[in-house]
Image: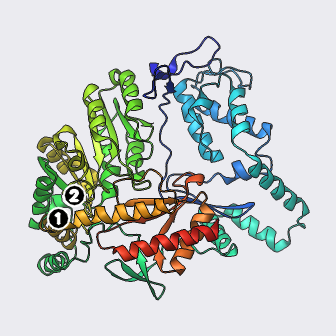
Amino acid sequence: MPILRAAGPDGGFLLHSVDSPGGAGERSTLWAKSGRRLEYGVTIVASAPASLSFPAVGRRSNEADRAAPSSHSRSAITRLVLDELARVRPARARRTLTPGMTLAEADVDAIGFLDAVNRIEGRYEMRFRDEWLTSIRTCGDLVECIATHMFDSVDRDAISASAARRRSDPEPSAATAAVSTTAATDPFPECAALEERLAGLAAAGLENPFLHANEQVQNRVARVGGRNVTSFTSFDYLGLAGHPDVTAAAKAAIDRFGCSASASRMVGGNNTILDSLDEELARFLGAERAVVFPCGYGTNASVFNHLFAEGDLILYDELAHNSIMQGASASKAGRRSFRHNDHAQLDGLLRDLRPQYRRIVIAIEGVYSMDGDYPDLPKFIEVKKRHDALLYVDEAHSLGTMGPGGRGICDFFDVDPSEGDLWMGTISKALGAGGGYLAGSDRLIRYLGFTTPAFVFSTACSPPNAAAALEGLRVIQREPWRVTRLRERSELFLKLAQDCNLDTGSSSDTPVIPIIVGSSTRAIQVSQLLLERGINARPILYPAVRESAARVRFFLTAEHTEEQIVRAVETLAEVMEITA
């Protein structure tokens, strides 16, 4: 990769950089690092200095690397760094690594270096800033960077206190030793780790914030734990999941076809409802063709692996959904992330990378479900055209929520869908059903509908789900006021929250509104106190987001009343004061 391989005269790397849009002479290093954002894993700090961590899917737990008594020592960091750099060296490298070696002398090229950096980030639960990396010339420089930036005074105090407690603890009893022996031989230590963390939540007086069961849902009032609460947890943006026409269509489909498709669409599970849904989706989106998949997550996870291979490159937004990253990871194609919504950085990457690949696909989302923001689609289309790349847009949270007619981000920006290549989405959110879809050119979608593993080898979307989504599309067109009301309710919540000086991040023009509270512990506390006061909004915790960006997330719908929204924000402001 010439963009990253150039060696400097001092043995370090001359890293590619381009002028940023901030002004003449201002420069921004472009690190083509793979994305590391993981969905729905959380770290919960119960009470200082103890910490509880729920590993995310695809992420191994490395608490020992960060929380071990000597983890902040220079010798421990040096051992870890040299181990990780040794792992990425070519097999021919024979020299023993030392801190004084330059990266070039160590035979660590830039791609290997970034791989090592990504692994170190996972092991130490930190994230390197670009400006830190540009000054790293030797193995020792990397050690120094970690020692300087990984542990702050709070970390060091917590580690020292933990070590002091261990020194003062009595010798373990025979029973404790037996338990330790069992733990050492446990084939699933991940289970034991989860059990310990759940116990830690209870010990800290915090409830498990996940898997709360709805006993009943009527409009936006849900019954949870025997009491009615106003729910801000649902993706049912337009209120179609319980719409009488939609539920009637689902019931009629059960009477006609049963509850399950009972086979893949390829070999007996297809039906006329699914065919009609394909056609109606294509018309609604303005695409030549669409095909419905059984699952939205599986659509992303399967299509990237299936369509892109060795010689291709997948460039995805660093905040892309886990399903996109899983699909990219499973593919033999190269993969890189770019800064969130930064079309300028993407343009610089493509300028240098495009000649090296057969195809490059840019993967973005119509609405980002953690932050409630969205990309400047016309700018991304310009970049895609300039470099002859493909554009893949995940519209899971923009279908039904963006644009005057709710037709998604193309509708919002008045862009012809033919300007993109693949439009992915789900029927599980605004359409009130369950499943995914792909839309685009007739030729490409026909191919993917015959060959994508998640389509070919999965049982088809159930008849009631397909019928509900089909009727949902028709309701949106018959009742366009639902899209208008959703926009009005979202704007009301956002304005009231900002008037109360609540941090709503970058959310704008969408029904996804985070309230950033600054720590995972406080996010759990705020969510718990809200529920006690009749408001259900769930916390989003590290590492799904940065610890300092932990939040309570609100989903607005067309069914929320103005009174419910006013009360929710008033209650939220009160709870934020209590937990300050």
Q: Which residue is at the front of the view, 56 or 284?
A: 284
Position of residue 38 relative to residue 192, above or below, is: above
Please give the label number shown on residue 441: none
Res. 198 image quadrant = bottom right
Q: Which residue is mark 2?
A: 406
Q: Which residue is mark 1?
A: 480
Q: Which residue is at the front of the view, 408 or 449?
A: 408
Position of residue 299 relative to residue 28, above or below, is: below
| Residue plotted at (77% across, 44% down) | 72
Q: Which residue is at the front of the view, 499 or 191?
A: 499
Coordinates of residue 328 in the picture (x, y in percent): 39, 43
* Residue extending furthest toward the front: 499
Res. 167 image quadrant = bottom right
**Image quadrant containing the C terminus:** bottom right
115 left or right of 135 in image: left
**Image quadrant containing the N terminus:** top left
| Type of the residue with mark 1 | Pro
Coordinates of residue 202 in the picture (x, y in percent): 65, 75
Q: Could you classify mark 1 by the number of other residues whose Cα lies within 10 Å: few (under 14), some (14-19), or many (20 or more)?
A: some
Residue 512 in sight here: yes
Residue 188 in sight here: no
Q: Could you classify mark 2 by the number of other residues whose Cα lies within 10 Å: few (under 14), some (14-19), or many (20 or more)?
A: many
| Residue plotted at (17% across, 64% down) | 480
| Type of the residue with mark 2 | Gly
Mark sitting earlier along the chain (2/1): 2
Coordinates of residue 79 in the picture (x, y in percent): 74, 36
| Residue plotted at (32% across, 57% down) | 397
Under circle 1, the secondary element is loop
Q: CB of mark 2 within 8 Å of CB of mark 1?
A: yes
Counting the numbered discs, the total is 2
